[in-house]
Structures are given as C-alpha cells and as structure tokens.
Image (cartoon, grey):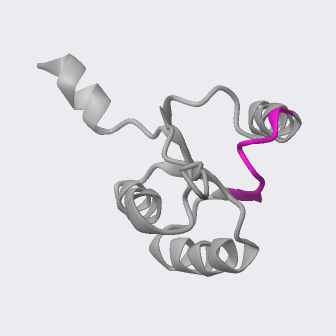
Amino acid sequence: MECEKEVGNARYTIIISGVSKGLGRALALEFAKLGHIIVGCSRNQTKLDSLQDELSTISSLNHLLLNLDVRSNDSVKEMAQIVLHKMGFPHIVVNNAAVMCQGV
C-alpha cells in the first residue's frame, strides 16, 4: 500500500527521557540508525556527551541532548520550548525516565 511506503520512509523527531543509559540509550541508537532525529534528556552530562559522540558516528542529523531533571516542572517546560523552537512538534515521545524513592 502507498500509505505504508510513505510511513516507512518518514523521518520522525523522537523525544526520549532517561536517554543516557539502558533502554533509553538503546532506543536512541536504534532510532538514529533508522534515520530519525533524537531529542533526549538525562541528568548525567558525561553520559549525554558519550551518547552524542556515538550518535554522531551513526547519523549526520542534528540530534539534541539536554541535561535536565524531569522532576523539575520548570526544566521540562523549558525543554518543551527548546524542542518546539528548534525541532517543531515531536512525532513520538518515549517517557523512559525513572524517579527513584530511596528508603521505600
């Protein structure tokens, strides 16, 4: 079907929280290999830098990785504004960030 062909060749902007390790990182790398634009966030700048380097070897697209804590509403709002300004509306959002409660 023509519709399936168009979807198969589409380039999506994909937001992934918790992108610096585990499932988030794996998804970012796989989506980048498929030709999609990655917008990711994490609290760990060192791991974000490492992921940015790896994404650069996979794809020449301008991926955007931001250091922020999703527990901060202000940070999430700021990220949304940055993404809308630089990338437009995202096509897919993967809410992968984990919030841990210690002592529970």
Left or right side of 22 for 40: right
4 versus 29 height, above or below = above
* Nearest to the observer: residue 10 or residue 85: 85
Left or right placement of residue 5 versus residue 45 in this view: left
Residue 61 position by quadrant: bottom right
Of 58 and 44, which appears nearest the observer?
44
Q: Is residue 88 above or below residue 29?
A: above
Q: Quadrant of residue 50?
A: bottom right
Residue 72 vs residue 85, the one in the foreground? 72
Q: Measuring 71% from the left and 44% from the top, which residue is drawn there?
A: 70
Give the number of marks: 0
Instruction: Name the spot of residue 5 as percent of width and height, x first.
Output: 21, 30
Nearer to me, 100 or 48: 100
Residue drawn at x 70%, y 38% is: 87
Q: Residue at x 75, y 57 (%)?
A: 66
- For residue 30, what is the image quadrant? bottom left
Q: Quick one: quadrant of the N terminus?
A: top left
Asked if the stretch drawn in magenta spans residue 68, the answer is: yes
Horizontal and vertical percent position of residue 92: 48, 32
Q: Which residues are magenta?
A: 65-73
Q: Is residue 7 left or right of residue 16?
A: left
Residue at the extreme front: 103
Q: Position of residue 98 (x, y in %)?
A: 54, 50
Q: Position of residue 64 (x, y in %)?
A: 69, 56
